[in-house]
Image: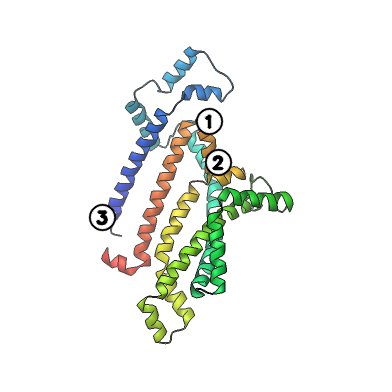
Amino acid sequence: MSKKQLINRLIQVIVVLFGISFFTFGLTYLAPGDPVKTMYASTGMMPSPEVIEQTREAMGLNKSFLVQYFDWLISCIKGDFGTSYSMKKPVVDIMLTKLVPTLKLAFTSLFIMICISIPFGVLAAIKKNKIVDYIIRGFTFLGISIPNFWVGMILLYVIALKLKILPVVSIGDGLEKIILPSLTLAFAMAAKYTRQVRTIILEELNKDYVIGAKARGINSKTILWKHIFPNSLLPLLTLIGLSLGSLLGGTDVVEVIFSYPGLGNMAVSAITSYDYPLIQAYVLWIALIYMILNLIIDISYSYLDPRIRERG
């Protein structure tokens, strides 16, 4: 990717973030309920209407929509996303606290998924229409069909409650706290990616360069791992990047089931408590992480595929 292309992409990121920030702030502005009353209700007390009005004025909520938006946008650019209504803490501090567990969960789940999907996807492709292929495809169909929350509840019931191998609640440090939520997330992803890997490998197997390599007597394993697999990395990299973006945004249902202290659990709590500053910061985080990951993937294409670099 050239410098001009990189600058254009960065400009696109800024424009999209600006649009998403406006859309997000507008939705929270139009949402029913009074943020000031919600903030006081979370403390278990409701002051007089005069105090509520004074608080609204102090928070700038009596200003027009555009004035409120630009005040909030300028604060966000400075790194100040406001104070959480329900937790009475700066939003940035809360997000950073929840980000660390989410990073651990995301990369652990992704690692488990890669360890399962790539070997099984390749095996299903090279054993096409044989018993091994049918068994793997059957398991992938099962994995895609079962919802994540149901898988999580089954693992919770069998492994945590019945066998008592792992803890029920995934709060605190320790590898054992992250195993069940990671397995739950990796289960559906591994099923999807195994099918994707199988499809990509089968497409590569039918291409001319593979047929030519076989005709020259090159070993099948050499063809697979030195020629087919590298050519399959680009579509796989795109899919993995999208999944990582989803994981880094927090996986709401799974985190709630296991009481995991990540961004997804935080987002659910923020929505149920009408914590608008936290919701706004969370949406911006999701948008930012997806765009950054897409940009990184696009840049990596030119390094993985020389043809793209030459065209650039």
- The disc, 2 or 3, on the residue closer to the chain's N-terminal end is 3
Q: Secondary structure at mark 3?
A: helix
Q: CA distance from mark 2 to mark 1?
A: 12 Å
- The disc, 2 or 1, on the residue closer to the chain's N-terminal end is 2
Q: Secondary structure at mark 1?
A: loop
Residue topped by disc 2: 265
Query: Badge 1 local density, few (<14 within 10 Å), some, or many (20+)?
Result: some
Residue 280 screen position, x and y as percent: 43, 36
Q: Is residue 109 visible?
A: no
Q: Quadrant of residue 310?
A: bottom left
Q: CA distance from mark 2 to mark 3?
A: 40 Å
Residue topped by disc 3: 4
Tag 2–tag 3 contact (CB < 8 Å): no
Tell me what residue is drawn at x 39 percent, y 56 percent.
Answer: 296
Residue 224 screen position, x and y as percent: 46, 76
Tell me what residue is drawn at x 52 percent, y 56 percent.
Answer: 144
- Colour scheme of the picture: rainbow
Q: CA distance from mark 3 to mark 1?
A: 45 Å
Q: Is residue 254 visible?
A: yes
Residue 254 left/right relative to 167: left
- In the image, is residue 39 above or below residue 244? above
Tell me what residue is drawn at x 49 percent, y 79 percent.
Answer: 221
- In the image, is residue 109 above or below residue 194? above
Label 2 is placed on what type of residue? Asn
Tag 3–tag 1 contact (CB < 8 Å): no
- In the image, is residue 273 above or below residue 108? above
Q: Secondary structure at mark 2?
A: helix
Residue 11 left/right relative to 165: left
Label 1 is placed on what type of residue? Ser
